[in-house]
Image (cartoon, coloured by chain):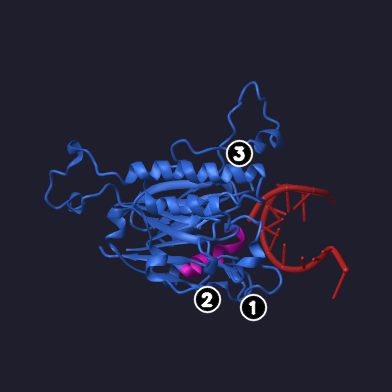
Amino acid sequence: MRLVTWNVNSIRTRLDRVLGFLDRSQTDVLAIQETKCRDDQFPTQAFEAAGYQVAHFGLSQWNGVAIASRVGLDDVATQFPDQPGFAKAIIEDDMDPLLDVVPPVEARAIGATCGGVRVWSLYVPHGRALGDPHYTYKLAWLEALRTAAQTWAEPRGPREVPQRSEDTSWGRGAGDAVALMGDWNVIPLDTDVYNVADFAGKTHVSPPERAAFDAFGKAGYTELTRQFIPEEHTYTYWDYQQLSFPRNKGLRIDFCWASPALASRASGALIDREERKGKGASDHVPVIVDLTD
DNA sequence: ATGGTAGCTGTGCTA
């Protein structure tokens, strides 16, 4: 089975390129970020015509996440447990604080079960600047996700031991097969950026962000693209500005953390750098993970 | 020389 994550930077602008990719890539499940539209604006029919079921969560022109699958799509969730919201949105949306003091959850996470794998399409908050409220939000968001992910990876209780011999998942000794895929907006290693000195004092490389990212590893997850693509200066994103792609001034910020039950099935990973070329490219490229059946 | 790109029901915000 082939899983892919891709920040498309507007699904409506990128629809032809996304459908073209699906047509030639043998993708079974595509986790999409930054659809930049509401649910009623999402091109569901185009995906269905291509043979994919699709679930989308979008509230405005910002963020927006989706999962497209040709191996089933069940039990859709549009937020993870205790996912923080962002307080600034209360002010901007002119909501009555007496009626709703809880910051609204943004459209940054969607989960669905596809072909037996619990897939999450995740768009981690950017952070904007060290000390910005959005930076605090980013760290809280990652911590809440890690807490939830840890429970998903735990071995299941005795009552959930499968009774049917053909269900081999229990034999792997771990919980659900979970794929946490998306744009993590964290540069985990100094060698994941063209020149780390340019990021001094900025987001994406700060020790708290890197610790929040590495915490998934401490929770038992494996980052599959690192496992199969250890080469330094291998990027998944290039800014639109200043000829970043021709100059290969990129960042590695799109990843797939796999629970133990999923990691044991991983057979390879690819970063489709070709998708950054030509007119109308997203600033991110598809990141591909392959699993044995 | 403080620019530059792209997308969004946008005259600014987000990345």
Q: Which residue is mark 2?
A: A274
Mark-to-mark CA distance, 2 and 3: 35 Å
Magenta residues (range): A12-21
Q: Position of residue A225 (x, y in %)?
A: 41, 65
**Which element type, helix, strand or loop, lies under badge 2?**
helix
Which numbered disc covers residue A229? none
A20 lies above or below B11: below
Residue in the image at 50% along x and 59% along y? A46
Question: What amino acid does circle 1 point to?
Answer: Arg
Alpha-carbon span between mark 1 and mark 2: 15 Å
Please tell me which of labels 2 and 3 falls first in the chain: 3
- Give the quarter of the image for residue B1: bottom right
The answer to whether the residues at label 1 and label 2 have Cβ atoms under 8 Å apart is no
The image shows a total of numbered marks equal to 3
- The answer as to whether the residues below labels 1 and 2 share one chain is yes
The residues tagged by marks 3 and 1 sit, at their Cα atoms, a distance apart of 35 Å
Is the residue marked by circle 2 packed among few (<14), some (14-19), or many (20+) residues within 10 Å? few
Of the residues shown, which amino acid type is indicated by label 2? Answer: Glu
Q: Colour of chain B?
A: red
Q: Is residue A12 above or below residue A41?
A: below
Query: Chain A appears what colour?
Result: blue
Circle 1 sits in a helix, a strand or a loop, which is it? loop
Look at the numbered discs 3 and 1 and tell me whether their residues touch, using CB distance below 8 Å. no
Q: Identify the disc placed on residue A247.
A: 1
Q: Which residue is mark 3?
A: A86
Q: Kindly identify which chain the residue marked by label 1 belongs to.
A: A
Determine the residue located farthest toward the bottom in the rendered image.
Answer: A246
Lower position in the chain sequence, tag 1 or tag 2: 1
User: Which quadrant would the C terminus of chain A be assigned to in this image?
Assistant: bottom left
